[in-house]
Amino acid sequence: CQGRSTRRPRILPALSTLACPDSVNKAVSPIAHARIGLGTWLLALISGSVAVLGLAAVWAGVALHFSSPSLWMLLIVTLDAALLLRLAGMPPGRTRLLLVGVVSLLTALAAALLISASQIGMRMGMPAQHALPALSPGLVLLYLRAQLGWLDGLWLLPATWLGWRLGR
């Protein structure tokens, strides 16, 4: 307003526009579409790659320990992807939501490959690192079809909700 001193710092600028209706047009609007910098993209790429490789290995270890695919790990994978991208500085919105989905999907695919290699390799008497190059996509799908049931697919619902909630 006219009589207000400009030397005092404004703690709540949104409330000051309520007190002075003429300053409503001068209020600074938040940036709606901030550009994502190259450093943020690189950090998101590196942290996403580490998340895919690291959590796929952890998921395979858990699955080997419990002798089941352990699809509850989808929740941990989605949570990890969302938090890593958030810590990498990726702004909330569709881009981060899409990246959470991509990182989760790549981790699930890598874990499925590692789980199949370790389980099939153990039954054939060979370690997972020797069984991995011998696997074909058809054999991995055959193993997963035999191991997964429709109840395992229900883990997709809370994982999808968690990814949507934390990715936006």
Image: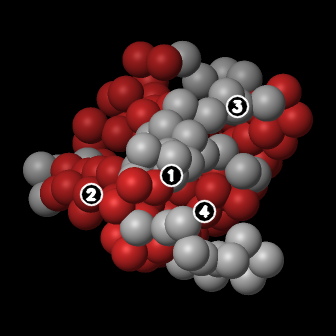
Q: Residue at x 72, y 23 (%)?
A: 133
> What is the number of the mark on residue 117?
none
Choose top left, top right, bottom left or bottom right for residue 124.
top right
Mark 3 is surrounded, within 10 Å at the Cα level, by few (under 14), some (14 to 19) or many (20 or more) other residues, namely few
In front: 77, or 165? 165
Q: Please, is residue 1 above or below residue 154 in the view?
A: below
Disc 1 marks a residue whose amino acid type is Ala
How far from the left and from the top, in percent, is residue 69? 41, 57
Find disc 4 in the rendering and name its residue.
83
Find disc 3 in the rendering and name its residue.
36
Find disc 1 in the rendering and name its residue.
27
Q: Please, is residue 135 above or below residue 26 in the view?
A: above
Q: Nearer the viewer, mark 3 or mark 4?
A: 3
Residue 11 lies left or right of residue 39; in this view the side is: left
Q: Residue at x 56, y 75 (%)?
A: 3
Contact? badges 1 and 4 (CB < 8 Å): no
In three-dimensional space, the C-alpha distance between marks 3 and 4, rounded to whole angstroms, equals 17 Å
Mark 4 is surrounded, within 10 Å at the Cα level, by few (under 14), some (14 to 19) or many (20 or more) other residues, namely some
